[in-house]
Amino acid sequence: MKILLALAISLAAFNSFASGSDAVNKLTSYLPIGSYTGSTDQGTACLVSVSEVNYPKKDIQVRVIEGNNDLTKLVTEGSEFGFKDYKKEFIQIDHTIVGNDDVNYVERIIRTVNAGDNKLYVVVSFSAVFNTNTDTQVAECIINL
């Protein structure tokens, strides 16, 4: 899981994605609003829920439930993101500094990528880093569209 996070961060850092400011429309073109059941690579059942929030804004909340992990990521109208259309790949990272330095932070990541034959891999992660303590949680799901 940590390898996946490192890969996502490195891809974003190298700016290998085209970027834009219409994150909500791009995400919902890959992952339409609704609820989806699926499974992980290990065959565990999971759920992905995509819903509009913060009306009248067009913000989207993606929730992934996998086992004991229940993680959400808010994608706001006009926010920055990366994408590759040919792979249905969407990535967005929210990095919030806590305190006066950049040592302590909270990070939320969403990533989607085509998993073949009308399937989409969706992952949401949460990391909190405070001094030398790190709490990382990941929820992933492969869904049929």
Image: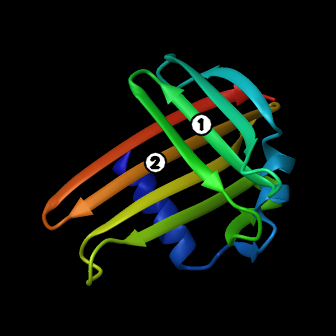
Q: Residue at x 38, y 23 (%)?
A: 68
- Residue at figure coordinates x 42%, y 70% from the top left: 96
Taking 134 as reference, is 32 left or right? right
Q: Looking at the rendering, which quadrant does residue 102 occupy?
A: bottom left
Splitting the image into 4 quarters, where does residue 145 fall?
Answer: top right
- Asked if 144 appears above or below 114 in the picture, the reply is above
Residue at the outermost bottom position: 100
Which image quadrant: the N terminus? Answer: top left
User: Mark 2, mark 1: which one is toward the viewer?
Assistant: 1
User: Which of the two discs, 2 and 1, labels the residue nearer the N terminus?
Assistant: 1
Q: Residue at x 59, y 36 (%)?
A: 63
Instruction: Where is residue 89? Give x, y as percent.
Output: 71, 55
Residue 63: mark in rendering: 1
Question: Furthest-front residue in view?
Answer: 56
In the displayed structure, would residue 116 be above or below residue 12? above
Where is residue 132 shown, x and y percent of the image?
A: 13, 64
Q: Horizontal placement of 48 versus 28: left or right?
A: left
For label 1, the SS is strand
Q: How far apart are the two marked residues, 2 and 1, measured between alpha carbons? A: 10 Å
Please state which amino acid type lies under the numbered disc 2. Ser
Left or right: residue 37 compared with residue 20:
left
Query: Which residue position holds label 2?
Result: 125
Residue 138 position within the rendered picture, expressed as x and y whole percent measured from the top left = 42, 41
> Which of these two is toward me, 115 or 127?
127
